[in-house]
Image (cartoon, rainbow, N blue to C red):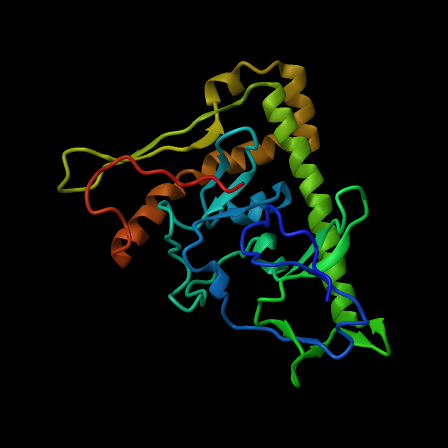
Amino acid sequence: MASAPQANLPLFYKDLMPLNSRDHATWRAKSMDSAPWLVGQHAIPLTVEEFPQAQRHFPIIFASGDNPVPLALMGLNEGVNVFVNEQGKVETPIYLPAYIRRYPFLLAKLTPDTQDLSLCFDPTSDMVGDFSEGDPLFVDNQPSDGTKNALNFCESFEQAGQKTAAFIEELTKHELLMEGEVAIQQEGFEQPFLYRGFQMINQEKLREVRGDVLRGWNQSGLLALIYAHLFSLDLMREIFARQQALGKGPAVPTPAAPAPVN
């Protein structure tokens, strides 16, 4: 079976293989009540369409560096996810970002010189394989309804990604992103726990944006997205408290940072 190019695989994916009726005619997909690929993953890519739901559960930050993608923080320290247990079972009712729900499928280019995207999957996942149980991927050599739904979901995710890129471009154009820092004072410690290594909206620069630009952002919904991000930052302290309660947080106040996801 031919595999897609393996360079720069995205988060979660250990391998990629194009889905086709020749090689996978008898394969099936099965659902799981846990997400083991989430264990130890603290920062999950997010699209702007998800900001209203995500901001109720996670701090929304932007990755540092030249590619400031939005991230939902499921933990403040690398290797810590406070919402799943060691088996990857979500222990609290939360909004699951589309990036998580998309796995193990993904739209990818099969060759570097094409613009066409093909439906691929991670063959190392336990969710897709030549099983005797589960939903068929193909029926009479044609994509099943389940496969069509996976394709539609991945296409919608790509479209949301384009809207997210446009949002980031607008923030960058107006130089609204700055290096972030959150200090959390814990009882019993003289020094606060510091979190750096991410970007956030510069509220001082936001107040300086021209009125006509702000009106345009308000009409387009962009302003609401900015405030969803800003309001969500208050959850940093809640995530920190969950880490400490689980015994997964830092023992002493040393500078720590949510690692960016590339």
Q: How many marks?
A: 0
**Residue at x-position 21% and y-position 41%:** 186
Q: Is residue 164 above or below residue 16?
A: above
> Residue at position x 56%, y 19% from top?
175
User: Which of 123/200 is in front?
Assistant: 123
Q: In the image, is residue 252 above or below residue 203? A: below
Q: Residue furthest bottom?
A: 132
Residue 113 location, x and y as percent?
A: 79, 41
The residue drawn where x is 58% and y is 67% is 125
Give the left or right position of residue 256, taking residue 216 as reference. Answer: left
Task: Please indicate whether residue 111 sits to the left or right of residue 170 in the image.
Answer: right
Q: Is residue 221 visible?
A: no
Residue 196 percent coordinates (x, y) = 36, 33
Left or right of residue 28, residue 101 in this image: left
Could you tell me if residue 114 is visible in this image? yes
Query: Quadrant of the rendered structure where residue 248 is?
Result: bottom left
For the point 25% across and 46% down, the residue is 250
Question: Residue 88: which quarter of the image?
Answer: bottom left
Whether 104 is drawn above or below 194: the answer is below
Quadrant (top left/top right/bottom left/bottom right) for the N terminus: bottom right
Quadrant that contains the C terminus: top right
Q: Position of residue 2 (x, y in %)?
A: 73, 62
Left or right: 53 with respect to 136? left
Q: Position of residue 135 (x, y in %)?
A: 70, 78
The one nearer the camera, 65 or 75, is 65
